[in-house]
Amino acid sequence: MDVIAYILWGVITLGPLIAYGIYTALRGEPRRADKPTTGTPSPSSGAATS
Amino acid sequence: MSSNDAPAVNDTPREARVVRSQGFFTPIRISRMAVLIALSVVGAFIKIPTPIGSPALDSVPAYFATMMKKWDWKEAGIIAILARLLAAATEGFPLGLPVQVALAFGNASWVAVVVRVVRLRFGYIAAIVATEVWAVVITLASPAMLMFALGVPLEAAFAMGIASLPALLVAAGIAAVLGAAAARAVQNTPLSK
């Protein structure tokens, strides 16, 4: 039972750091895309205006 | 010495020299990490008493750094590790230095990885909720730490961990809310770049 507690401690302490470190090194940090801005487009944005 | 022997540093455009020196430890990143680590020491003196020590508000700057979307997660991790060690140093490293080092890395896993992933995916409120949930997860792992440090049996260590949970929840909740509020306030300023 004590061994399980020590293993659990190690996994919870270092597991996320190691796993996320490997993941971000390979694929980059997952970021949610910024929300599109609302409002009228500026003339320089390429939107067709008439 | 002819002019041809002189180093060509001055011939290089200034912008090119700056780009060559870019890496993880850029001057602006080191500067803001230094400020946030210093603020962590200030927060370490605001304590919430528990049976196994005193959780303090030393992790508020780390929460702030992890809530900043455009900052690097390793930045928040380094701040979290140093904040925990400096906070432990102010109280004489309770439970011993090895336990405090393990706590520091656990703090970094919690703040810089778990909370950050939730903040990037779901936003501030979810990150605060994740902070509280992760405090319970840490409590399940803390008996091993207490067995290692104090030599008490598993049942006693688990009871001490449960006893410290309310203060841990309060401290973590306050730190996460303060960090999220500060990050929200400066999210659209030049500081967030």
Image (spheres, rainbow, N blue to C red):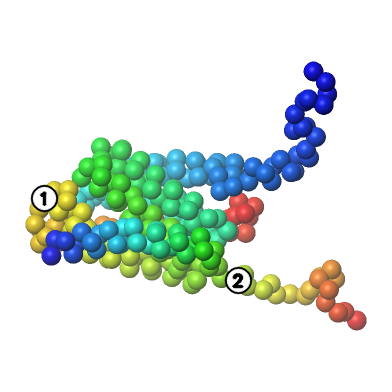
Residue positioned 35% across, 47% down in the render: B84
Residue tagged 2:
A33
Q: Is residue A19 left or right of residue A5?
A: right
Q: Is residue B100 visible?
A: yes
Q: Quadrant of residue B27?
A: top right
Residue positioned 35% across, 41% down in the render: B86
Q: Quadrant of the N terminus of chain A?
A: bottom left
Q: Tell me if mark 1 has few (under 14), some (14-19) or many (20+) residues whose alpha carbon lies within 10 angstroms of its own.
A: few
Can you give x and y, in whole percent of width and height, for residue B59 in the image? 39, 51
Can you give x and y, in whole percent of width and height, for residue A28 in the image? 54, 63
Residue positioned 48% across, 45% down in the render: B36
In this rendering, the label closer to the viewer, 1 or 2: 1
Q: Tell me if mark 2 has few (under 14), some (14-19) or many (20+) residues whose alpha carbon lies within 10 angstroms of its own.
A: few
Q: Is residue B107 above or below residue A48?
A: above
Q: Is residue B95 left or right of residue B179?
A: left
Q: Which mark is residue B151?
A: 1
Q: Is residue A35 left or right of residue B144?
A: right
- Identity of the amino acid at label 2? Ala
Q: Quadrant of residue A45?
A: bottom right
Query: B3 or B113: which is nearer to us?
Result: B3
Residue, far top: B1
Residue, far bottom: A50
Query: B56 or B146: which is nearer to us?
Result: B146
Q: Is residue B127 above or below residue B179?
A: below
Q: Is residue B184 visible?
A: no
Query: B185 or B69: which is nearer to us?
Result: B69
Can you give x and y, in whole percent of width and height, for residue B109 in the image? 38, 58
